[in-house]
Image (cartoon, grey):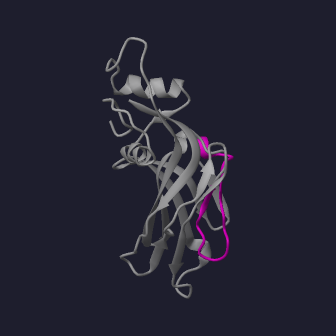
Amino acid sequence: MGCRVPGPVLIWVSLAEGDSGAVVVQTAPGKVVTHRGGTIILPCRYHYDVSAHDPAEIRLKWTKVTEPMAFVDVFVALGKARRAFGPYRGRTALQEDGAGDASLIIRNVTLQDYGRYECEVTNELEDDTGVVKLDLEGVIFPYHPRLGRYTLNFHEAQQACLEQDGILASHDQLHQAWLEGMDWCNAGWLEDG
């Protein structure tokens, strides 16, 4: 099993092209780096035909993808109305850096903030979505339970990492650590099970 002690946060961003033509959402390529407890911006911009729609009718919605088809509401804005949900209350806001900016600011980044986020912009019946992956960068370390190697199931491994103030590492994180010189061989659990 590989656990990680969280460090700076990386945001990997993808570009989404709209099919409708009326609203197009883009998440800029690149990465944003911060540390746990820091502040990050999930970049998202949108474009639409201004002459056809009132800006107050544009709905911006951020959700976190928890499983392939399961989502948790993070933040919603419609006109001047704003609402954050659950653990994101008091920690999130829109950047609002000019027209078409739907970028989300998350303060006091936590381990639970790790994952994929969707930025959805809806203009009456037209909408488009962009995806941003929030990845926590940290130190990968092997964990050896008291009762010996290979004794933990997936959920026990998750709990063991939490008790070490970490989370299970992803395959990509483990591979990056190997590229940076980590050299040990153990069978164990990764974050995708």
The quarter holding residue 155 reads top left
Along the line of sight, which residue is nearer the eye, 51 or 92?
92
- In the rendered image, is residue 26 in sight? yes
- The vertical placement of 184 against 48, above or below, is above
In which image quadrant can residue 76 be found?
Answer: bottom right
Q: Is residue 144 above or below residue 92?
A: above
Residue 160: x, y in percent?
Answer: 46, 23
| Image height of 144 relative to 64, above or below | above
Quarter of the image containing the C terminus?
top left
Residue 145 falls left or right of residue 96:
left
Q: Is residue 59 toward the left or the right of residue 67 in the image?
A: right
Give the overall secondary structure of the magenta segment. loop
Residue 86 in view of the camera:
no
Position of residue 30 in the picture relative to residue 150 (left or right): right
Q: Which span of residues is magenta-colored?
A: 86-105
Residue 7 falls in image quadrant:
top right
Q: What residue is drawn where x is 44% and y is 25%? A: 143
Answer whether residue 152 is magenta in the image. no
Q: Is residue 104 magenta?
A: yes
Which residue is drawn at the image coordinates 58% and 59% (left, top)?
Answer: 32
Residue reaching furthest to the top: 147
Q: Position of residue 189 (x, y in %)?
A: 35, 32
Tell me residue 46's x, y (percent).
53, 74
Q: How many marks?
A: 0
